[in-house]
């Protein structure tokens, strides 16, 4: 009997391992895309290749690597975030997972940067030292880039767009409109084409610090009230909370964006187009409308760059020409499309591994660059090919090691803690929301948004896109 039991357990483990391996190979393409995006943004901020290889003209004429990486990440988020919410059907668990996924690494990165870096080499923005409470509250809500409040660390601006996308996804889900991804994506893209240079910027905060404080108080009251409703587990309160979040997000992107209107609107068009591609793959939308939608969004992204990304707009998009914006945007779509076509193939393990630590790579690469500049202060610049190679690869190696440690010691433990907390909350305060209906198999579960190392992820889990951080 013992032999039979051991054999059965061994067979069960083998079957589970095979399923996990199959799931990993199916979803490795998303990790690979994250890895590419992470590498692109980090190398762009490092800037070494541009004067090392004397290719300063490339971002102006071909495409901006920062824009490319960010847009690629937004496509990945759009593909996976709504799928994660719909699969579990539990808005409360979704938001708990998001909080435990995003905030711990952000907090640790800021605290360590403040403790280690001197003021003249500080990665934390100077405005944060002058207005600490306003900065803390705005960045705590993670919608600071839409409230006229400086990002504590420059790359955190993209987390605002992630957060507002979560607002929209939640509002659509609780109101039963979450399958309308295609018309929503096309509406955002069409608006970018028509009013991309017309919408006023910073309308709600053009009165100085007083207006910043008022908007922060108003947005804070809305978010806190909405979260109380969502975490109550009641159907009506959850619907009200989700609707409040969606309304807040819409007001902010239409009236108070820091960036240009065309970039802001195209970011959300891109994310919802990513959702359309997920629905196409899982038979939730017909091929023709899906391809029409994605084609329109892609072309719109190129056209808005050509039409509007000039003169003062360049300063707000942090690009050097319309070609740098449009080329990078088109490149992100091309790379995502290639990855999706190759999704059934196995990708290099190093690339999928880079995807698993990409959130830490994004948040940590700027502090590490500032640390390097501090330590090299007063030294003559590197001029030889050998010295620049050593500098570049040394920094990248240090970044990967530190990011892996951050992933193992911060991301995974807090993601596990988040799952335990939400299980305890669900036991103590059962939700009266209806159980989720079975959905098409997705990727792994917000297994801390950033999945566990590829070979160890459970097959049934759903992979969630990690929050992005980008240019800044």
Image (tube, rainbow, N blue to C red):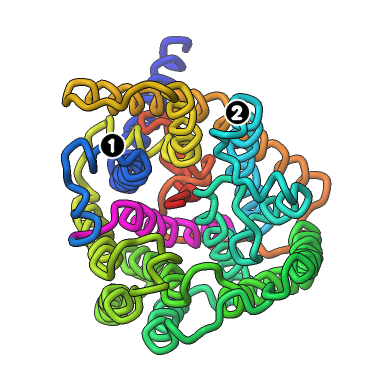
Check disc 1 and report its element: helix, strand or loop. helix
Mark 2 = which residue? 118
Is residue 87 located in the magenta-colored stretch of the structure? yes
All told, the count of numbered labels is 2
Looking at the image, which residue sits at the far top? Answer: 2
Decide if residue 121 is on the left or right side of residue 91: left
| Residue range (magenta) | 62-88
* Residue at (72, 69) in percent of width and height: 208
In this image, 83 relative to 119: left or right? Answer: left
Where is residue 296 drawn, in percent x and y? 29, 80
Q: Position of residue 251 (x, y in %)?
A: 63, 78
x, y percent for residue 472: 46, 51
Q: Residue 246, can we see it?
A: yes
Q: Foreground residue, 396 or 223? A: 396
Q: For this view, does 6 lie left or right of residue 416?
A: left
Is residue 462 part of the magenta span, yes or no?
no
């Amino acid at each position: 009997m013992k032999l039979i039991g051991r054999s059965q357990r061994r067979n069960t483990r083998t079957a589970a391992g095979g399923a996990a391996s199959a799931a990993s190979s199916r979803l490795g393409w998303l990790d690979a895309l994250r890895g590419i995006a992470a590498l692109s943004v980090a190398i762009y901020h490092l800037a070494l290749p541009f004067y090392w290889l004397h290719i300063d003209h490339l971002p102006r004429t071909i495409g901006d690597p920062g824009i490319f990486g960010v847009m690629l990440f937004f496509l990945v988020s759009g593909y996976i975030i709504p799928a994660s919410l719909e699969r579990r059907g539990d808005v409360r668990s979704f938001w708990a997972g998001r909080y435990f996924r995003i905030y711990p690494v952000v907090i640790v990165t800021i605290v360590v940067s403040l403790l280690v870096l001197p003021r003249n080499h500080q990665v934390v923005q100077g405005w944060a030292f002058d207005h600490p409470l306003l900065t803390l509250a705005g960045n705590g809500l993670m919608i600071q880039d839409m409230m006229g409040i400086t990002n504590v660390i420059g790359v955190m601006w993209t987390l605002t767009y992630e957060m507002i996308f979560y607002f929209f996804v939640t509002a659509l889900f609780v109101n039963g409109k979450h399958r309308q991804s295609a018309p929503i994506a096309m509406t955002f893209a069409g608006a970018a084409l028509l009013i991309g240079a017309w919408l006023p910027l910073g309308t709600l905060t053009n009165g100085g610090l007083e207006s910043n404080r008022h908007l922060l108080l108003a947005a804070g009251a809305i978010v806190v009230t909405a979260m109380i409703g969502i975490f109550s587990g009641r159907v009506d309160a959850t619907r009200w909370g989700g609707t409040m979040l969606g309304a807040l997000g819409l007001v902010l992107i239409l009236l108070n964006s820091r960036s240009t209107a065309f970039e802001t609107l195209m970011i959300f068009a891109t994310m919802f187009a990513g959702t359309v591609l997920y629905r196409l793959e899982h038979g939730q939308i017909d091929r023709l409308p899906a391809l029409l939608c994605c084609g329109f969004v892609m072309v719109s992204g190129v056209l808005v760059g050509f039409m509007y990304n000039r003169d003062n707009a360049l300063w707000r998009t942090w690009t050097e020409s319309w070609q740098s914006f449009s080329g990078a945007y088109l490149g992100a779509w091309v790379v995502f499309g290639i990855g999706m076509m190759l999704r059934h193939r196995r990708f290099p393990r190093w690339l999928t591994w880079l995807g698993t630590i990409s959130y830490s790579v994004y948040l940590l690469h700027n502090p590490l660059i500032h640390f390097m500049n501090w330590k090299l202060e007063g030294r003559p610049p590197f001029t030889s090919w050998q010295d620049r190679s050593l500098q570049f690869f040394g920094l990248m190696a240090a970044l990967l090691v530190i990011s892996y440690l951050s992933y193992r010691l911060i991301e995974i433990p807090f993601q596990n803690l988040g799952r335990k907390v939400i299980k305890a909350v669900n036991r103590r305060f059962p939700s009266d929301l209806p159980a989720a209906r079975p959905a098409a198999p997705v990727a792994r579960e917000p297994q801390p948004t950033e999945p566990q190392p590829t070979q160890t992820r459970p097959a049934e889990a759903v992979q969630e896109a990690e929050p992005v951080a980008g240019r800044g």
